[in-house]
Amino acid sequence: MTLPMRTFRGKQVLALVREGDYAHPGNEEPVDLMMKDVAPNVNRLILDVACGLGGTAKYVQNQHWGKVTGIDIEAETIEYAKKTYPEIDFYVADVINADKILQQKFDLIYICGSFLCFADQQDALKSLRKVAKDNTKLFLFDLVDRSDGTSVLISNQRNRVVRANSIKALGKMLQNAGWQFLIYEDLSEKCAYWYKNLVDKIRAKKQEIITKFGEYEYDSALTRYTEWHQEIHEGRIGCGIYRVQAISSSIKNRNY
């Protein structure tokens, strides 16, 4: 059994290792890649789904890409984010209830490395469509299954489940939820490097992690991300950015 890294304690371990409030690999680099075609616009409404400790939301807002709102299922995580980044609106919310919690619709939505952890991905995408405007863009930075479900990250039942999808499977899921799949940008080579760098940093900070959190937390992080790096490096799991757009209501009404 390993410590789930999506818990508040797991995110704290990752923040220590990454030297920033990020739970996804690569820190700012995948965010820059995800937002590379987005022009600065402080009036753009952006939703950070599964925002974690708030580091990505803060970075996105600081780059003037828009006004960010963050949601996360874990109350302790949101409490930390609110105290640390008070200029950003954060809410405790399960993504499948986003449309019941949020009182506005967004111009841009992103999920940075967390979609694979969602228990009900289809309902999550449907809920997000309800808080999206027509033609809202959705960016998903996520792992991709290249193994037909045989990767240990997907088949392993050690108290965690990784729900990585093939590109085809996710495309179908998106369409069923009212989203149009535009393009997939493969970042597998970069992602392998990011995870290798993460594993090296975990080892380098061994004593600091054990002193602050415990040996169990160190072993959990090292085991988990060594395995993730190996699966990506050996090609069973890929990694990249899906660029998606909301299907307009008028088109949906004509088609259905």
Image (cartoon, helix red, strand yellow):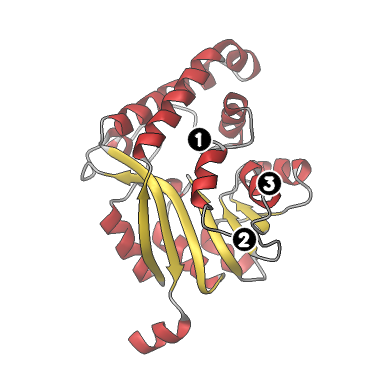
Assess whether mark 3 and mark 1 are in contact (beta carbons under 8 angstroms): no
Q: Is residue 20 visible?
A: yes
Return the residue found at the far top: 207
Query: Could you tell me the amino acid type at mark 3?
Result: Lys
Structural distance between the alpha carbons of marks 2 and 1 = 21 Å
Classify residue 65 as left or right of residue 215.
right
> Taking 213 as reference, is 7 above or below it?
below
Tell me, for residue 132, which label it has, or none.
none
x, y (%) of residue 222? 45, 21
Q: Front-most of 134 and 129? A: 134
Residue beneath the point at 67% across and 62% down: 41
Mark 1, secondary structure of its residue: loop
Classify residue 49 as left or right of residue 175.
right
Classify residue 222 as left or right of residue 108.
left
Label 2 Cα neighbours within 10 Å, binned few <14 / some 14-19 / many ≥20: many
Tell me, for residue 26, which label it has, or none.
1
Quarter placement of the C terminus? bottom left
Assess whether mark 1 and mark 2 are in contact (beta carbons under 8 angstroms): no
Q: Earlier in the sequence, mark 2 or mark 1?
A: 1
Residue beneath the point at 45% across and 63% down: 125
Q: Earlier in the sequence, mark 3 or mark 2?
A: 2
x, y (%) of residue 12? 62, 30
Residue named by callout 2: 46
Label 1 Cα neighbours within 10 Å, binned few <14 / some 14-19 / many ≥20: some
Q: Is residue 1 visible?
A: no
> Taking 194 as reference, is 219 above or below it?
above
Residue named by callout 3: 58
Query: Could you tell me the amino acid type at mark 2?
Result: Ile
Quarter placement of the N terminus? top left
Query: Could you tell me the amino acid type at mark 1?
Result: Gly
